[in-house]
Image (cartoon, coloured by chain):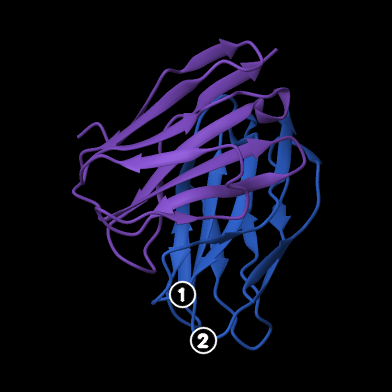
Chain colours: A purple, B blue
Amino acid sequence: NAGVTQTPKFQVLKTGQSMTLQCAQDMNHNSMYWYRQDPGMGLRLIYYSASEGTTDKGEVPNGYNVSRLNKREFSLRLESAAPSQTSVYFCASIPYRGAEQFFGPGTRLTVL
Amino acid sequence: GNSVTQMEGPVTLSEEAFLTINCTYTATGYPSLFWYVQYPGEGLQLLLKATKADDKGSNKGFEATYRKETTSFHLEKGSVQVSDSAVYFCALSLPNDYKLSFGAGTTVTVRA
């Protein structure tokens, strides 16, 4: 079991470029999440998908879009990157409501 | 709403010292409580959890007891090692909620 995997591990973008962060889990979990982590800000939820076919906004969704491609995969897209989106992005999943979350290793994104 | 408040850091200790990180919560209903640990450059991983009042979670020498009367879930370890240097997050979830509420995180550094 690989758990939750994320690609890429590192990325540098220029302002205005677009990119998609990929996340996959092999634990047959129903719900998946995208967070960003910034110094002194803790973890902030961007979007989540309670189940395949549904997505909902978290507390900081502006500038991002998501796709729940299938039960395994949940991608995060930056259409026009901005320096304020420089952050570490984590994907997570849970098997059912109220359970603990399983996290991926993170993607470190720098926008110049 | 639901929220988690944890002790602000950073905390610096010597090896073999006693560690305690305070965590208190506000929640409607009966939450499950978690401690996550994040080692440098890695994602979050579950350290321990408790799902009902008076439960004690334990792992790797760390312990925390779910105290409903004081709405607390303080993390303790009797003798820390350099390898315990990490960021620690307290979190809660409710049975019918897809989302976790995280504390801001406490950075712990253990010196040899």
Badge 2 density bin: few <14, some 14–19, many ≥20, Cα 10 Å: few
Residue on which disc 2 sits: B29
Residue type, numbered disc 2: Gly
Task: Determine contact: label 2, label 1, CB under 8 Å.
Answer: yes
Residue B75 percent coordinates (x, y): 62, 59
> Can I make out residue A47 in this image?
yes
Above or below: residue B101 compared with residue B2: above
Label 1 secondary element = loop
Residue A74 percent coordinates (x, y): 33, 39
Residue A95 percent coordinates (x, y): 27, 58
Rendered-image quadrant of the N terminus of chain A: top left
Residue on which disc 1 sits: B94
Q: Is residue B10 left or right of residue A48?
A: right
**Residue at the spot 63% in from the left edge and 38% down from the top edge:** A37
Q: Is residue B111 left or right of residue A27?
A: right
Q: Is residue A13 left or right of residue A94?
A: right
**Residue at the spot 71% in from the left edge and 57% down from the top edge:** B21
Label 2 secondary element = loop
Mark 1 belongs to chain: B
Q: Is residue B98 left or right of residue A35?
A: left
Residue type, numbered disc 1: Leu
Q: Nearer the viewer, residue A88 or A15?
A: A15
Q: Nearer the viewer, residue B28 or A77?
A: A77
